[in-house]
Amino acid sequence: MPESRPLTFLCITTYEKGQEFMRECTRQGCRVLLLTAEKLRDANWPRESLDDTFYLPSEIPLDDIVRAVTHLARNQKIHRIVALDEYDMETAATLREHLRIPGMGLTTMRYFRDKLAMRMKALNSGVRVPDFVPVVNHNDIRYYMEHVAGPWVLKPRQEASAIGIKKINSPEELWPMLEQLGDKQSSFLLEKFVPGEVYHVDSVVSESEVVFANLSKYGKPPMNVAQGGGVFTSFTILRGSAEDSALREINRDLIAALGLVRGVSHAEFIKAQADGEFYFLECAARVGGAYINEMVEAATGINLWREWARIEVAGEDGIYKLPATREEYAGVILSLARQEEPDTSPYNDPEVHMRIKKHHHAGLILRSVDQRRVQSLLERYATRFAEDFMAVQPQRERPTA
């Protein structure tokens, strides 16, 4: 049967994000329900775009969420369920399957959530990945370390970004860690540490086709910033360059292999110092964090949250058309700040496009028609940020809201 209109979206997030997604759904004539954490009751939600909001207590079991949403569905027809954050993807996929609502199911979800699953799928599809081994069979792990030279990294399979990653220099370092993990060790993988420069590709996908991709490079690998402190930067790479062309092709192959039908993705690749080849690191079916969306919009005019909403509204029977884009360049610089409200006004070059306002953070978005100008400014600003603002806190084992 054809869907009734207006569509009702159930947006799920346990972190404060996705406001523009919800606003765009409302602009498209949809009803929007928000399911979020009780601790975010007073967060800056776009309340004018919400038809209702429901709050969850912390640590609520998934089965209880399914029962609660199923009860809600008795009186409200839900057409779309969208996880706005990576940590809510399993909840959303479980609800879709239980209520038989279109969208990503549990099997495909794991290719964008489980680092082991995504590596195995990518490798089987011909996408180059660093040598890895599941942390399951200890004989396999011993064989791996005998034949794959260290150092290695021990990675949680279902954490985001660099959270929880440990660098391992010898087998003697690994075994006590696994002993400490106990029955949780199978939730990790062991991977060869590949020194190099890290890139990310932020894409819009409609009906399994990458219709938009913005290619960027981190100033420092995110793992280095997360574990050693420092200033985070990222910037658009030169369009038409060999790196740009190679990554676009790899990203298309990756998205096809992982099976994303519609939505957005944030994929990371490393260009190895040893051989100059690109290796796949991870891919998430979400908008990238750390103000990457704002950087992409400054360079191209494309707001990833907005386009994701428009694709979800179009659905499998709709027609989505990407808006006109521009081909400029942008960069982001962000640092934890010693000051509660840091003053970035001395950073006053005309390329400063946006000043990031966040408690105990200093940040800027730059925009220019000249890629080298953006990169040069970021390098200079990073040195100044370290002196003017930078604070360091211990590496997080879990993300914060």
Image: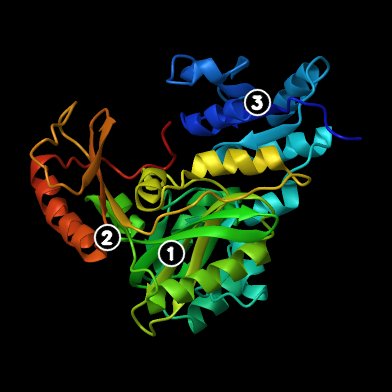
Q: Secondary structure at mark 1?
A: strand
Left or right of residue 387, residue 372 in this image = right
The disc at residue 29 is 3
Q: Is residue 363 above or below residue 133?
A: above
**CA neighbours of label 1 inside 10 A, class few (<14), some (14 to 19), many (20+):** some
Q: Is residue 343 above or below residue 319?
A: above
- Which of labels 3 and 2 is toward the front? 3
Q: Quadrant of residue 318?
A: top right
CB atoms at circles 3 and 1 under 8 Å apart?
no
User: How far separated are the C-alphas under marks 3 and 2?
Assistant: 40 Å
Q: Is residue 178 above or below residue 19?
A: below
Asked whether 25 or 18 is in front, the reply is 25
| Percent coordinates x, y for residue 74 in the rendering | 83, 17
Asked whether 128 or 208 is in front, the reply is 208
**CA neighbours of label 3 inside 10 A, class few (<14), some (14 to 19), many (20+):** few
Q: Earlier in the sequence, mark 3 or mark 2?
A: 3
Q: Secondary structure at mark 3?
A: loop
What residue sits right under mark 1 in the picture? 153
Q: Earlier in the sequence, mark 3 or mark 1?
A: 3
Q: Secondary structure at mark 2?
A: loop
Amino acid type for the residue under numbered disc 1: Val
Identity of the residue drawn at 80% across and 22% down: 77
Count numbered badges in the picture.
Answer: 3
Left or right of residue 127, residue 370 in this image = left
Q: Residue furthest front?
A: 324
User: How far separated are the C-alphas under marks 1 and 2?
Assistant: 21 Å
What residue sits right under mark 2 in the picture? 219
| Percent coordinates x, y for residue 320 in the rendering | 65, 48
Q: Is residue 340 above or below residue 146?
A: above
User: How far separated are the C-alphas under marks 3 and 1?
Assistant: 47 Å
